[in-house]
Amino acid sequence: PYKGPSADEVLEKRKQFLGPSLFYYYQKPVNIVEGKMQYLFDESGRRYLDCFAGIVTVSCGHCHPEISDAIMEQSKILQHATTIYLHHAIGDFAEALASKMPGNLKVVYFVNSGSEANELAMLMARLYTGNLEMISLRNAYHGGSSGTLGLTALNTWKYSIPQGEVHHVMNPDPYRGPFGSDASKYAKDLQDHIDYGTCGRVAGFIAETFQGAGGAVELAPGYLKLAYDIVRKAGGVCIADEVQSGFGRTGGCYWGFETQGVIPDIVTMAKGIGNGLPLGAVVTTPEIASVLAQKIQFNTFGGNPVCSAGGLAVLRVIDKEKRQAHCADVGSHLISRLKELQQKHEIIGDVRGKGLMLGLELVTDQKEKTPAKAETAHLLEKLRELGILIGKGGLHGNVFRIKPPMCFSRDDADFLADALDYSMSKL
Ligand code: PMP
């Protein structure tokens, strides 16, 4: 049994020594002391079904034995030396990752987080095109570093600092967007922004295919194809942010962008790539990658042996355990359960997503789509009482984000649906 400090003691120390910008879920935050696959355990040994995977990060499961072993074995031999020397792990991992990419996306840069990956992607876009202006979607989250904060388009995270040369175009959100699922109308807005708001030439366009922090919004079908064409005509490169939606999570495809039938010029990754290790990557074409050769692009920890060994094990486990097909199967079961609940509970405005990248948007008025902010917060607490940890998101905090470790089973999906049904019935 756990013998460490209590939740109150942990919270007290956090308040004393850590920054006030940290936030936590639940009026009385959960003190997580252990994790095993799709389950988390608190200090009293209580088990929770994890439906949020450490913010869509624990792809294969908490402390997955094969991944933990790979990390530990490498830690015993060599933890760090940097790329000024040779070590096979970074190349092995890059080769395995490149083999998962379509087209000519064959060159990998390793970093330590999603923000770093997007910073690097933006740098490449600007150097390669010789243009400055970037475009991202409203409702996007691409990071909290000074450059990526400009790409992020949700005021929750935006400090008042210079936001760079970034334009935010209309979000092709089928539920809340003014044009519903009509991708061509949103694409027209993008074209208008380029025509009226930029010099006519742009460096790049970045988008998540399934917006994460923005509340599990799946872009209107066909949008990315239209957007990529428009951006490329304006001299820009197209960046897919796969920090949340990659690695088979959406079921039908390994990458989120593939669900829209496009091939980006640059792909950024983090979170699920490491199953919890601090790891990120940027993959691009040899031609685009070559622009960085003007100088040295160096990252002390990027591709270090421990993260590379762990990341390689993640890729192996996803294939070996057929996680992509599993996400498709469990995801479609869960979506149909959630759609049934939608018939029964007026508060469910929208059920969306693919595989195990799902969103449940709660509204107090189906017609007006008034965000059920207080109700969502209340249900979050109730679900926790029932042993379920789930994510929350969207600008108004009224969307449940269901993105569990990919080992999540049909039984887990039923338990979640039953718990939602029960707690919504008590509202
Ligand atoms: N892109 C997306 C889509 C994300 O969800 C996040 C993190 N929530 C980031 C980038 C930034 O990643 P990190 O927190 O690792 O810097």
Image (spheres, grey):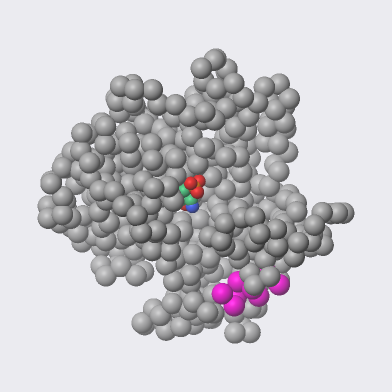
Q: Residue at x 66, y 47 (%)?
A: 61
> Which contiguous range is marked in magenta?
377-385
Q: Residue furthest top?
A: 86
Q: Is residue 294 left or right of residue 409?
A: left
Q: Is residue 1 left or right of residue 10?
A: right
Q: Is residue 320 left or right of residue 161?
A: right
Nearer the observer, 308 or 361: 308
Per the picture, the main secondary structure of the magenta-coloured stretch is: helix
Q: Residue at x 39, y 78 (%)?
A: 369
Nearer the observer, 198 or 255: 198
Res. 231 in view: yes
Residue 312 x %, y %: 59, 30
Task: Relative to 257, say whether 186 is above or below.
Answer: below
Task: Relative to 394, say whether 357 is above or below.
Answer: above
Which quadrant holds the N terminus?
bottom right
Task: Relative to 224, say whether 392 is above or below.
Answer: below
Q: Is residue 179 magenta?
A: no
Residue 333 x %, y %: 57, 61
Nearer the observer, 360 or 271: 271
Q: Residue at x 49, y 64 (%)?
A: 393
Res. 99 in view: no
Q: Residue at x 57, y 17 (%)?
A: 87
Nearer the observer, 13 or 97: 13
Residue 251 x %, y %: 50, 49
Residue 203 x %, y %: 24, 40
Q: Is residue 383 magenta?
A: yes
Which quadrant holds the C terminus?
bottom right
